[in-house]
Amino acid sequence: MSEVTAGIEQGTSALLSELPESMVGIWRRTMEPEGMVYRRDPRFANEFCHWAQVDRITARKSGKRIVYAGESGARGFLLDPFFRPSAYLEQMLSQVEESVQVEVIDLARVSIKLKDLMKVCTECIQLEPDVLIVYAGDNWRKSLWGLTDEEKHQVLDVLNRGGEERFQGIQAVFEHKSEGFIVSFLEQLHQQYVLQGIPVILVIPEFNLKDWRSSKSDRELVWPQGEQRLWLEMSNQLDRYVHSGQLEEVQKLVDRFIELNRANPKGYELLGRLQYGEGQTREARQWLERARDTSVYRLGPPPACTSFIRDQLLTYSHKYKMKVIDLPAVFNRELNGGLPGFNLFLDYCHLNPEGIHLMVSEIASTICEALGHDQLPSSILNNRIKPEAKTQSKAHFYAAIHSAHIGDQPYEVLYWHCCEAMKHWSGIADWFVALADLSARKTPWLLNQSYKTICTPQYVILRQFRDCMVMDMDLVQAMLQCLKEAGRDIESEINDLRIREHAPELGETVDLLETYYRENSYFNVFAGSKSVDYNHRNQIYYSARSHTSSFYLIADPKQQLLVNLTLRRQHIPQDDNQVLIKVNGVTVFETLLNEHWSSHSFSLDRGLLLDSGVNQITFHWPNIDQVVEDMASAIQAKFDPYEQIIQRARPVYGDIFKLEICNIYPLKEG
């Protein structure tokens, strides 16, 4: 061990003297009376919340130093800073050899990009680690979309050739790009660490395969090429089969459904859940992994480590002589072949206390092996440390918010988290009330006292976007239901508050294109857009990029309202050009679309509106099969190659310039 340590110290010192930079992440090297330290640089104060809450990192002394870098999964997101994997790891390692001090330096950052992670790994050699741990892979998918000019034209060539194999062609471009940056990253680590005798341990993330659901946006057609009508018919038929329990019919239809558009997760998810229900867990895993892997075709959340990124990490880590902790394999072993779900996760990729324990135990064992220690005894490995009940309750509260805002998850997922939060700490009920109050009001969160109640360091991205304010309908409803079950029914109060805040007064109008009414999550914000349209910040009208568009309509049920509408469609087919508008499932208006803006008005009778005050107005757009080639030609003439790829991924079904509800009729009681 002494020869290895001497080699490490000699190599580290040589590299340190060659480094011109004095930064490690947000910590700047400085000389203080007690020696060299790294102190948080005030210039990066807005970054502090995303890193470990550590003001300074001291120079290395005696003992062992482990540097722990990575993404939000490494941070223990939703539990951090009150329950941190790095602290858990340090405590576990300290029990191995009590005479040797073990220090774990936490350099993981929430939402870190690949290039920034590479920079941190380069910089942290200055800390003279004995071992470097890198937990990464979830955030790399978005880096694939930084396409070179050659790659853009390769994707466009694939799209122009068309056919059912177009998705394999696009994925091949992404796989080649992924292989390039993975090789570059691992080669850098090999040169800087492995060749200097410093072990590198890669931790490959797993995904919540069993309990996470693809969002409504995920399940829209991507890069359609004339299959929309048939795809929708089959999708609706599958829904009917599932609802009626005709699982054999689902099995017969779903293979063809997948072939129509392989970038859509719906068919894979259906097959995975069918197989899981029949006890065929291995087959279920394969289908659910394929559903997750369709995320490579989208820019939006959630982050995920795809199968080809995992495979490449496994292949090249061996080549570059690094140790690997493959969490999919670890969890599969620990669950005896079962699927990972909320048994190990808080959301899509962030681990719960049990998942953290399994991960940390595996890391600790691998470190001991790398440093030549005996294997950890079972008494240490099986000693589970759990966070306080209040911390776990808040973790589920924040997981519900995160799942709604970032993942656009269904009511059932949000309700489960709310119930779990209540189980751990009854005081979370006051937080439910606070969030319901926040979401119902138009007052910006920062000006509302309720925000101070629920804003803590445990969820550093609890925020309200100025250009994407939402009412959190499903999330609030889940919390109201939990409150009701606990004997605290405030649903009517929240309904009345929404009506006061959002319903039009007599003689006033409400613009339903405001994000309060057209969005139910921050999904489109994180997909790269902060405007009415999916892509363009400067566009002043709404573009529908799905065959349906839904808007919330908040109104007193005794009101009679007038709807003013201006819309168009830039590419008109020879037939099927009628848009259908429904309120709460009842058809209220229909009209033919025009290439130019056309305005319409229609009234809504009182009997249509729901007592809760929360209604939905839904546009059913005609299909685009006949005009998809015309749309591609127009996109090619107007946009650069990258924008062509984005625009063709989600074509426009129709545009809305105005969607207003007007209260011009006096309120009639009874």
Image (cartoon, grey):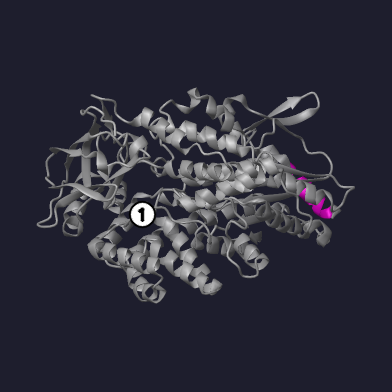
Task: Residue lying at the far left in this picture: please name it.
Answer: 574
Say which residue appears at 69% left-offset and 47% top-offset. 85
At mark 1, the secondary structure is helix
Task: Residue lying at the far right in this picture: please name it.
Answer: 99
Q: Quadrant of residue 608?
A: top left
- Rendered position, 318 above or below 100: below
Residue 391's x, y, as percent? 67, 41
Residue 641's x, y, as percent? 29, 48
Q: Quadrant of residue 296?
A: bottom left
Q: Is residue 265 left or right of residue 23?
A: left
Dot 1 crowding, Cα within 10 Å, few <14, some 14–19, many 20+: some
Identify the image quadrant of the C terminus.
top left
Residue type marked 1: Glu
Residue 9 is a magenta residue: yes
Q: Which residue is mark 1?
A: 151
Q: Is residue 365 left or right of residue 139?
A: right
Identify the image quadrant of the N terminus.
bottom right
Say which residue appears at 44% left-offset and 45% top-offset. 474
In the image, the segment drawn in magenta is 3-13
> Residue 129: in sight, yes or no?
no
Residue 401 is a magenta residue: no
Q: Nearer the viewer, residue 134 or 332?
A: 332
Could you tell me what secondary structure mostly forms the magenta stretch? Answer: helix
Residue 71's x, y, as percent? 58, 46
